[in-house]
Amino acid sequence: MTSLIKKISHMAAGLAFGLAGSLALAAFPERPVKLVVPFPAGGSTDLVAREVALELGHALGQPVIVENKPGAGSLIGSELVAKSAPDGYTLLMAGLTNIFLPYVHKGLTWNPVDDFVPVGLVADLPNVIAVNAKTPYQKLPELIAADKAKPGQLAFGSAGPSTPSHLVCEMINHQAGIKMQHVPYKGNAPAVNDLIAGHIPVMCNNLGGTLPYMSSGQIRILAQTGRTRSPSAPDVPTFAELGLQGFDSGLWVGIVAPKGTPDAVMRPLRAALAKALPAVKDKLAKLGAAALDPSLPAYGQRIAADRKLWDPVLKRVDLKSN
């Protein structure tokens, strides 16, 4: 009888544990989720994040609140999330910039890529080089010729050190043999404002953050990254078409959580993202972005490909943190 009672007690305990586990799975999320964007409000990463956050919240059954934490080429916001509790309530809109950060900020005690666990890829935006429409440069070769004639006379704006907009223009310097001078900003939006105002003649940016001003005639886009032209800018040639190589990768973004976030939390997050992306595909296209495959294999492949592509470039360019 005693052994039977013990057996029943163990079964009851097991059932209770299983029920508790099921309730824990069902409990996430119990409150709003924060999605940190490591760039200022108004830029393309921010706009993409806000579109996705709305649908992600619907899929999760809790609001997903976008919070901007700009600075140091995305380092500040990325570090904040990396050191947050791994409970799924603080996420990061990460991207290509996370691959660049260790090359700029030497001696980091954490890894901007490996100290996160991916929820999934979100979107890809081509990078572009653009000029104020009042400048005389109609095509990229004209811009290159002007700087070769007077090396260093042209200044280009970027979203800040280590950002894709910075590295794309540095890559142009390297490939074309010119010396445009870097003027870093705290995000793409303020740099675009100065480009439109004529305070800087040139800027490298993502397509989404530049396209509206091309349409209004304030900015002229001279070239775009990617193997093919974006449907959002079919008249803008790729760098490859103009004879410059190494510009296949665009500005991709994805959602990640702090390393150590349990599978019981990651599963509903990934399921919600997979549900949310099809609902925002058309909205992302209007921002010049293409929705990406949010699966884990796709994320891993993208990280591996970009590390291989950018590593030799980042080692050549003299990057400094501002």
Image: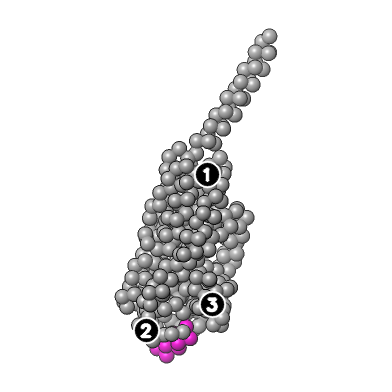
Q: Say if residue 202 shows up in the picture.
A: no
Residue at (36% x, 71% y) in the render: 192
Q: Secondary structure at mark 1?
A: loop
Q: Secondary structure at mark 2?
A: loop
Q: Which residues are magenta?
A: 140-150
Q: Amino acid at mark 3?
A: Thr
Q: Crowding at label 2, few (<14), some or many (≥20) Cα neighbours within 10 Å?
A: few
Q: Secondary structure at mark 3?
A: loop
Residue at (42% x, 43% y) in the render: 32
Residue at (57% x, 65% y) in the render: 306
The mark that comes first in sequence, 2 or 1, is 2
The residue tagged 3 is: 238
Say which of 287 and 92 sits in front. 287
The image's mark for residue 261 is 1
Q: Answer whether labels 2 and 1 touch (C-beta < 8 Å).
A: no
Q: Nearer the viewer, mark 2 or mark 1?
A: 2
216 in relation to 295, above or below: below
The image's mark for residue 135 is 2
The mark that comes first in sequence, 3 or 2, is 2
Q: Answer whether labels 3 and 2 touch (C-beta < 8 Å).
A: no
Alpha carbons under labels 3 and 2: distance apart: 21 Å
List x then y, in percent, for residue 190. Answer: 34, 67
